[in-house]
Amino acid sequence: MTKLAASAMTDIGRVRLMNEDAVLADKDLVAVADGMGGHPGGEVAARTAIDALRHAFVGGTVERLREAVITANRAVWERAGTDGGLEGMGTTLCVAAVVEADDETGVGVAHVGDSRAYLLRDGQLRQLTDDHSVVSDLIRAGEITEQDALHHPHRHVLTRVLGMGPDLEPDSTVLSVHRGDRVLLCTDGLVNELDDHQIIAVLLSVPQASSAAEQLLAQAVAAGGRDNVSVAVIDVISTSD
Ligand code: MN
């Protein structure tokens, strides 16, 4: 049985006046969300998505996890449609959870937008998610490089978020995990301030999930803190093997 020890934290950063990110670490269900749409829409969108996700996912396969993200989308979409002040709000969502897979359990990951999941295994950091963004599409098409993307005029434009319509296709995957694996979920406020080497250094040197999350936030804020920043550090503490 896969068991996780997770810690999720968020920081307003040094520039923004509000924190429009939201996080969840509820035993076997962990998530980060990055809301948009101005005050109060961004905060409401992220919080609505997280709350709806928590109620909708009661365990099961990664397909159930995807369905919970779709339910969360509908909750944000409906709320935006019934409250004029919240029109146009949206949010990213990146979630990891223990899921049933074949005759064992694994970690399911589902996401929408540019909030990311990474796997740290054997000292290597591997990105598990593809951003739903204009620049990410351009990189995949070979039209620009990762380096170009950092300064691209459309670098903040997302192609998929929760709350934009009644229907949504989240991406999802299932990881077969081992004890000692560490999964990181984060909003763009982390990866826009810290590079992979800085992130790896913290994840490798700080054993406790909550301390690692705290340090990642502190370093992102110290590096500029130009956006809200959220992280969830998830340690796989036991598996069936
Ligand atoms: Mn952000």
Image (tube, rainbow, N blue to C red):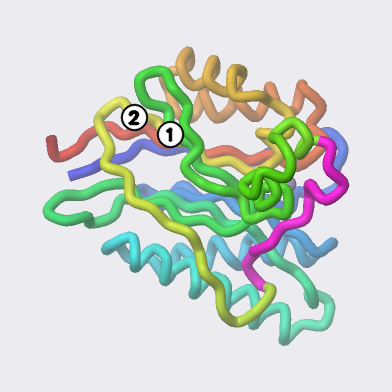
The crowd level at tag 1 (other Cα within 10 Å; few <14, some 14-19, many 20+) is: some
Tell which residue pokes out farthest to the bottom in this image.
Answer: 82
Left or right, residue 1 beside residue 93:
left
**C-alpha gap between disc 2 and disc 1:** 7 Å
Q: Is residue 112 magenta?
A: no
Kind of residue at disc 1: Leu
What secondary structure predominates along the stretch shown in magenta?
loop
User: Element under label 1?
Assistant: strand
Magenta range? 151-163
**Residue ID at (80%, 64%):** 37
Question: Pointer 2: what residue?
Answer: 181
Of residue 22 and residue 105, the one placed in the foreground of this image is 105
Give the vertical position of 85 relative to 223 (above or below).
below
Could one spot residue 187 in this view of the protein? yes
Query: Label for residue 119?
Result: 1
- Horizontally, residue 182 falls left or right of residue 158, namely left
Mark 2 element type: loop
Q: Image point 41% across, 18% down: which residue?
A: 123
Residue placed most toward the observer, 136 or 31: 136
Where residue 30 appears, as percent x and y from the top left, is 45, 49
Q: Residue at x 87, y 47 (%)?
A: 153
Q: Is residue 139 above or below residue 20?
A: above
Q: Are marks 2 and 1 in contact (CB under 8 Å)?
A: yes
Point out residue 140 in the picture as x, y percentages from the top left corner. Answer: 61, 47
Figure quadrant of residue 177: top left
Earlier sequence position, callout 2 versus callout 1: 1
Residue at 50% over, 42% down: 117
Query: Within 8 Å: ligand 1 and the Cβ of disc 2?
Result: no
Residue 185 badge: none
Residue 213's spot in the image, x, y percent? 55, 30
Badge 2 density bin: few <14, some 14–19, many ≥20, Cα 10 Å: some
Residue 102, given in percent of the width and then of the height, sits at 16, 56
